[in-house]
Amino acid sequence: MANLQSDLILNVFYVHADSQYLRQRNFMQLSIFQPDFEIAINHLHNILDYYNQIIDA
């Protein structure tokens, strides 16, 4: 999860995953600070698709 968190932060997503509650459940919260939500969501899907490809490989 640490790499995903770093990648999301580098791609202009605000990520919070450091609270005890979130760590225990392997959760993270993210916010999007971009004016165009649709572009940001598509970018998020691309990042997650990349991680799914790595997991499936």
Image (spheres, rainbow, N blue to C red):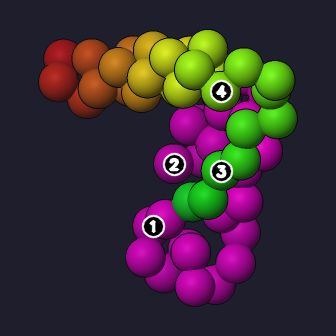
Of badges 3 and 2, nearer the viewer stands: 3
Dot 4 crowding, Cα within 10 Å, few <14, some 14–19, many 20+: few
Q: Give the range drawn in magenta.
A: 1-27
* Amino acid carrying mark 2 in the image: Met
**Is 20 drawn above or below residue 44 in the view shown?**
below
| Residue 34 point in image, percent of width and height | 80, 26
- Mark 4 near mark 3, Cβ–Cβ under 8 Å? no
In the image, what residue type sits under mark 1? Asn
Q: Name the residue under label 1.
A: 26
Mark 2 and mark 1 in contact (Cβ < 8 Å)? yes
Decide if residue 6 is in sight here.
Answer: no
Residue under label 2 = 1
- Residue 50 point in image, percent of width and height: 39, 16
Q: Residue 30 bears which disc, if any?
A: 3
- In the rendering, at what x and y percent does residue 30 appear? 65, 50
* Residue at the image point whose x is 72% and y is 20% from the top: 36
The residue located at (56%, 75%) in the rendering is 22
The answer to whether residue 33 of the structure is visible from this angle is yes
Residue with the mark numbered 4: 37
> Quick one: which residue is furthest to the left in this view?
56
Q: Which quadrant, please, contains the C terminus?
A: top left
Kindly report the distance in space between the C-alpha atoms of the residues bearing marks 3 and 2: 13 Å
**In this figure, what is the number of numbered marks?**
4
The CA distance from mark 4 to mark 3 is 13 Å
User: Which quadrant would residue 6 be assigned to in this image?
Assistant: top right
Q: How many angstroms separate mark 4 from mark 2 (CA)?
A: 24 Å
